[in-house]
Image (cartoon, grey):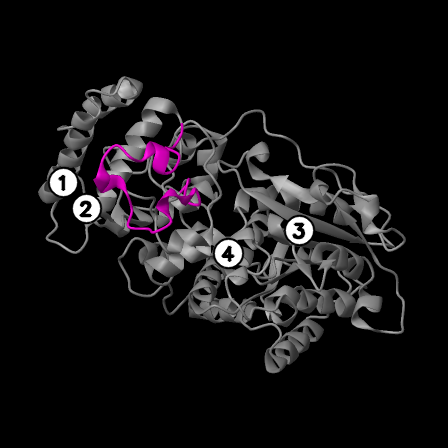
Amino acid sequence: MTQTNTENSIPIVDLFAGPGGLGEGFSGLSKNAFHIAISAEMEESAHQTLRLRAYYRLLKKKGVEALRPYYLFCNGVTALPYDEKSSPDWEEAGREALRLTLGDEDDNLRLDHLLKEMKIGADKPWVLIGGPPCQAYSLVGRSRNMGTSNYKPEQDHRHFLYKEYLKIIQRYRPAVFVMENVKGILSASVGGKLIFETILRDLANPDLAIGKKMNRGGYRIHSLTCKTYFDRTMNPDEIDPRDFIIRAEEYGIPQARHRVILVGVREDIDITPDVLKHASELQTVEDALQTLPHLRSRLSKQADSPELWAKAVNQHLKDLRNATVNKKEMADVRIALGEYAGKIPSNLDSGALRYPKDPEILPPDTQLHKWYADKNLKVWLNHEARSHMTSDLGRYAYAAVFAKARKRSPAGHSEFNLLDTLRPKHENWESGKFKDRFRVQLQHSPSTTVTSHISKDGHYFIHPDPAQCRSLTVREAARLQTFPDNYFFCGNRTQQFHQVGNAVPPLLARHIAKIVKTVVDKI
């Protein structure tokens, strides 16, 4: 491994790393606090993103001038992120960010070999972080699984990927570990047993869980929101598992993301982690998205141009306004529709992977934007609008205007019946199952949870500005997730959305890293 500035910093091993959100928070804490020794991810595009960010960090340690090839790539000047001089750093990034499938025998052996080579072990403090894949735990995933007649949770390998994480804890004894997962893990069960209770017991006593006869002591599993903890002498029913839920919006993240985060501290380390400090005020969608250029969506399945798009949206708005004329209960919505009907601009661009910045627009002087901004970027990365069917444009325009008027999204078919054209072609549309089918991210509130579903369609992630009539871009979703603007997401747009939706918000990870650093410093 490169020794630049790492001799006195704490090594991090990041498993199931995705695009690197959790690792970004730790590695970006402060100079020399932590360094990523290894990060591992199985999905190809996420691994490409992970490697590119590892490369960025290696260059950053050498100074601003060393970052020149990275910015030439981001700004679209060069096709590759490295040049002859920085090629060794690119290769080094490839040794740090690994494409591994944990659970695969060969990949497990490869990871073991590298950890031993780096002398990772209990004799020197190191930290394990990561979030085992959570599809099987998530409420949406479980609902989908229930619809599969032959689905058997006890045969779903995704339920037990945390065991791979557990094996690393048992073998290499980190001083601290941080494990993230979806809230649904608290209620998921296999064979009539709650998975979360099993996970707590296993993490608290890894030797017993793996079936080893040795007993080198266990871990205390701490909450970061209160003083609740669990150790191997306890029963899970002695604690409230909801104490392990972190509500990100309470800690300065512009998103109502609720996740389970467990912090394990080795028993021989008699230190209790601090709890997260609440932010003084909520960060909102508007706080996060301001300064990003306005974009239009594109028309799918027909000819597209800025003029044709504006004409289609204006017509939808006029039709909607006319439909409210004799509806007293819709007076507020009619007024809001009148503010936009016929006034949709016909000169908006639809964005690009690298969309030119206006140098006249400066970031606001806020802590959030100091975290996002990078003056070396001449473009907005990953800021490209989706294409939408004209029928969806009508639904998006209606939902966004409704939200402007009533400070909430329209709720299902009962508030989506102004025109027949608003009704989706769903047999179950009026069943009540789709009450949030079209959801606007409200301007003056934190967003709802950015999930991987955003990779499939944008219906849950409608932009609050009716004049843009579209779903969020990858960059906007990344802002809500608190990824810095210089974080480049690789792969196609669907893959980029998937990476962003599955990640831990880096700014939240940074808050957690501060707490972990305090623990390790006291050892």
Residue indicated by mark 1: 312
Rendered view: 509 above or below 255? below
Residue 187 bears which disc, if any? 3
* Residue at the spot 64% in from the left edge and 77% down from the top edge: 108
Marks 4 and 3, Cα distance to the nearest angstrom?
A: 38 Å
Residue indicated by mark 2: 390
Q: Residues within 10 Å of mark 4 (few under 14, many from 20)?
A: some
SS under mark 1: helix
Where residue 510 sits, quadrant-wise, is top right
**Position of residue 509 measured from the top left corner of the image (x, y, whole percent):** 59, 46
- Amino acid carrying label 3: it is Ser
- Amino acid carrying label 2: it is Thr
Looking at the image, is mark 4 or mark 3 nearer the viewer? 3
Q: Which residues are magenta?
A: 408-436
Mark 1 or mark 3: name the one nearer the start of the chain: 3
Within the magenta stretch, is there residue 411? yes
Labels 2 & 1 near each other (Cβ < 8 A): yes
Where residue 212 sits, quadrant-wise, is bottom right
Mark 2 or mark 4: name the one nearer the start of the chain: 4
Residue indicated by mark 4: 57
- Amino acid carrying label 1: it is Ala
SS under mark 3: loop
Where residue 163 sits, quadrant-wise, is bottom right
Q: Residues within 10 Å of mark 1 (few under 14, many from 20)?
A: some
**Position of residue 254 measured from the top left corner of the image (x, y, whole percent):** 48, 35
Mark 2 or mark 1: name the one nearer the start of the chain: 1
Q: Is residue 363 left or right of residue 315?
A: right
SS under mark 2: helix
Q: In terms of depth relative to the viewer, which is nearer, 397 or 477?
A: 397
**Position of residue 340 measured from the top left corner of the image (x, y, whole percent):** 20, 27
